[in-house]
């Protein structure tokens, strides 16, 4: 089947590995005015695709006279027991926005995914991006939860507990630590995403008498925290503060520490980070479109 869709102004088609360079160029232009800087180069873009399980052969480009003006990057996997396509980035270059490019891409690809038996479409969108939120609602997406992005340039000083051992662990060991969770991590912070990007991550466990009672997963050198959890029996004993302090020592000196996609319903966790100097930068809606 020739998966193409001719629209009045745009042609949408699936991509392949030969599209990497123009896709990166379009990605950088589309997100050049994004609320947070991407600073994306070829290596980081490959890491982004790998982290989110993106399949370029099932990702879509939107073209105008053979110029790529928009894209939708799609990752594939399981989410809450259902086969899922994940939007790892949909963008349109600034001078082609509000002309129907995003709608054209979704109109093109969603029926293909539905016919392939994929059960749902998952994405995140900044809460104050009303045009995008309204587009997704029009397409049938519903809001699952709200996620927050927090950042700290410096950490507030706290008394640190040295009565436990910190040591590195592997992504395989995270499976048995899910019992520490109070909420499910987002797609890009999931155990599966951490396994795909383990070579770029540091996974630090806190141990008491040989038992892991807390852990943190963060981007090596950058301080971007993907997972952070402490056994409920050991909370309030300084383990979280010690983990944060250790992350700070392993970061690049000028980098800000970031917690991305923290479930907003975890108010105690937010208060923990706020007490240590973190501030909310933005919020996103996690949205799902049932396909079956």
Image (cartoon, helix red, strand yellow):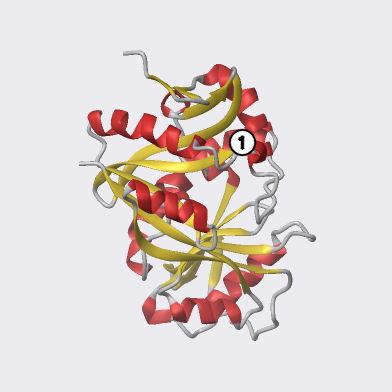
The residue sitting at 44% across, 33% down in the picture is 105
Q: Is residue 252 above or below residue 53?
A: below
Q: Name the quadrant containing residue 186.
A: bottom left
Instruction: Using a 10 Å C-alpha cutoff, classify the residue at mark 1 as few (fewer than 14 neighbours), some (14 to 19) or many (20 or more).
Output: few
Q: Secondary structure at mark 1?
A: helix
Question: How many numbered callouts?
Answer: 1
Horizontal and vertical percent position of residue 145: 38, 64
**Residue shown at the point (55%, 24%) measured from the top left:** 63
- Residue at x-position 36% and y-position 50%: 138
Q: Nearer the viewer, residue 118 or 271?
A: 118
Q: Nearer the viewer, residue 272 or 147?
A: 147
In percent of width and height, residue 285 lies at: 44, 60
Q: Residue 59: x percent and y percent?
A: 45, 29
> Is residue 62 depicted above or below 28 in this figure?
above
Residue 162, visible in the rendered structure: no
Quadrant where the C terminus is found in the figure = top left
Quadrant containing the N terminus is top left
Which residue is farthest front? 8
Looking at the image, residue 99 lies above or below residue 138: above
Query: Is residue 291 among what the camera can see?
Result: yes
- Relative placement, left or right, of 230 versus 219 is left
Q: Is residue 109 above or below residue 274?
A: above
Q: Residue furthest right?
A: 254
Residue 225, given in percent of the width and then of the height, sits at 56, 60
Q: Which residue is mark 1?
A: 96
Q: Residue furthest top?
A: 1
């Amino acid at each position: 089947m020739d998966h193409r869709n001719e629209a009045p102004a745009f042609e949408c088609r699936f991509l392949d590995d030969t599209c990497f360079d123009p896709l990166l160029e379009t990605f950088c232009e589309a997100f050049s005015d994004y609320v947070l800087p991407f600073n994306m180069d070829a290596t980081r873009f490959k890491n982004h695709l790998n982290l989110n399980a993106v399949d370029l052969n099932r990702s879509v480009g939107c073209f105008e006279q053979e110029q790529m003006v928009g894209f939708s990057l799609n990752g594939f996997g399981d989410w809450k027991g259902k086969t899922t396509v994940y939007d790892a980035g949909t963008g349109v270059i600034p001078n082609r926005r509000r002309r129907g490019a995003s709608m054209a891409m979704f109109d093109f690809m969603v029926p293909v995914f539905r016919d392939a038996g994929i059960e749902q479409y998952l994405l995140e969108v900044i809460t104050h991006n009303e045009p995008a939120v309204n587009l997704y609602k029009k397409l049938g997406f519903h809001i699952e939860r709200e996620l927050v992005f927090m950042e700290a340039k410096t950490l507030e000083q706290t008394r640190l507990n040295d009565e436990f051992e910190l040591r590195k662990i592997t992504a395989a060991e995270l499976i048995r630590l899910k019992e520490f969770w109070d909420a499910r991590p987002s797609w890009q912070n999931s155990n599966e995403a951490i396994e795909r990007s383990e070579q770029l991550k540091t996974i630090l466990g806190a141990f008491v008498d040989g038992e892991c009672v807390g852990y943190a997963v963060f981007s090596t050198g950058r301080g971007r925290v993907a997972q952070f959890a402490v056994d409920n029996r050991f909370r309030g004993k300084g383990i979280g503060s010690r983990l944060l302090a250790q992350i700070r020592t392993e970061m690049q000196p000028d980098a800000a520490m970031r917690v991305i996609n923290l479930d907003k319903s975890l108010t105690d966790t937010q208060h923990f980070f706020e007490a240590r100097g973190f501030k909310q930068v933005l919020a996103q809606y996690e949205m799902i479109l049932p396909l079956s």
